[in-house]
Amino acid sequence: MLRTLRIKNLALVSDLTIEFQPGLNVITGETGAGKSVLIGALSLVLGERADRNLIRSGADSCAVEALFDAQSIPERLGTFLDEHGLEPCENGELVLKRSFTSAGANRQFINGSPTTLSAMAQIGEWLVDIHGPHDHQSLLHPARQLDILDAFGALHEQRRHFATLLHQRKSLQAEKASLIVDEKTYAQQLDLLRFQVNEISAGRLQPGEEAKVEQEHQRATNAARLLELGQVALDIVEGDEHSVLERSRHLGRVLNDLTRIDSGSHALAEIHARSLETFSELQSQLSGYLEKLETDPERLHQLEERLNILHALRRKYGSTVVEVIAFGQQAERKLAALEQRDTELARIQAQLEKVQAELRRAGDTLTALRRKLVPQLSRAVIKELNLLGFKQSAFDIALSSNPDGASNPANAGFDSIDFQFAPNPGEPLRPLRTIASSGEMARVMLALKTVLAGVDEIPVLVFDEVDANVAGESAHAVGEKMAQIGRKRQVICITHLPQVAAHGTTHFVVTKHVKGGRTYSEINLLSKAQRIPELARMLGGQTEAATRHAETLLAD
């Protein structure tokens, strides 16, 4: 669930922190108080595109941070974080943060790790399902309707299996297409691959070779100078009577005389002995280094030729020697496949036929399962619609299948479906997209959410004034349904209806005030006693009748 939402410098909000609770969280307030800012902030931290005009006037940037209880999030989240190099959830908490500036800089973080907007949006789809006053159209898309039916029947594994087979078929078809070419193109591909394989093979490449060759080339190129510098260094260490070793030996004799007079200065002689050993080792190492150095023009020429070969192969086939080797190995495989084209085509065709048969069976299985689910989901939705005020409405799902044609856009089988609805008795069923008003759509969506509450994996549902154009007993029913969903999922509802607000387990009110010539939005958690005047305001004013009505709503 969503525990905390913090907003800084967004629209009318200066700095605001909201602590949400389990169950049904209702948010009320006057029109224009800033309720929609809360949904906008949540949308931003879930990966929606940012609008710089949302930054509060006078501020250079804004930020939104959301803290989720990771225990209620699908298990695939952990795998997703690991695959994208993001920090795991600590103490059962997932932290999302989004910030952007008036200059256009946009930054997002998951558990403190920088990430992409697409990664944040992907996680957002698993966390929160937001329904605004104009968002019911998601119910009108056939792909979304199919998702709802499959979620109701828990067909996730069957869909994944079908999608895997479909991917295999596409890969085999692409592999087959690469082999089916005209003879001229076939000959050209063979020539090119043979040239590439031979050229890379002739290079006799070894991983890590280039660094070693460059180092040896640099040493060979500067051999004369290195000999000169090395000899100067050796002369300084072991040369004439003024060399380091001779001066050090003289120093040793002086210190020995010193220790014979003062035994307490023995430590000085020990330090000198160690330094003399160090200079002796330096002398030995310098001598060995100079013996290995040689000015060999032939060797230098060989190294230059080798570097030229390495650089030429890198320019053609990869930025590193390892990449060139990998390119050569891939080219060898392609060449082998082309040289055995007929054999490969026969193999691919056999695999294609096998996968196609499996795909057909998987698609037929999905279709059969869906046909069984259609009447079950229809009956469940009709039951909920009756409780929401549609006493004699009809709801059904038209399913069509085309196993010989292309699969549906969602790669989820051969089927397409269409939700059909008749809100009034005597009317024929028609596609939901053609007849439902916004108020009707809100209640259909609530009916579906109620049915799916037990199987839906999304832990947080947000309803932003979805009860528009609903009143009277229907408003009570909508509030009851939201509370019912809230027993299985966290629900956040922005509403103008007191009948809906009274069902909240937690009630927040958004207010707007002016301070120092600036307008600020604030949100406060109401106690039970404070809810009565807020509900009375929503009922029409602070009259005695409105107050009694508010008390009755809360008591009921």
Image (cartoon, rainbow, N blue to C red):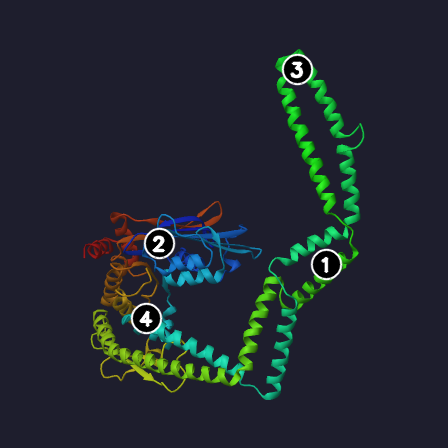
- Which of the two residues, 46 or 446, is positioned nearer the viewer here? 46
Q: Is residue 283 left or right of residue 113?
A: right
User: What amino acid does circle 4 point to?
Assistant: Glu
Which of label 4 and label 2 is nearer to you? 4
Of mark 3 and mark 1, the one earlier in the sequence is 3
Type of the residue with mark 2: Ala
- Residue at which label 2 appears: 70
Q: Earlier in the sequence, mark 2 or mark 1?
A: 2
Mark nearest the camera among 3 and 1 is 3
Could you tell me which residue is drawn at 70 percent across and 53 percent down?
216
Classify the position of the N terminus by image quarter. bottom left
Mark 3–mark 4 CB contact (< 8 Å): no
Please tell me which of labels 4 and 1 falls first in the chain: 4
Task: Please identify, in this view, whether the residue under mark 3 or under mark 2 is nearer the observer.
Answer: 3
Residue designated by label 1: 303
Report the amino acid beneath label 3.
Thr
Q: How many residues crowd around disc 2 within 10 Å: few (fewer than 14), some, or many (20 or more)? A: many
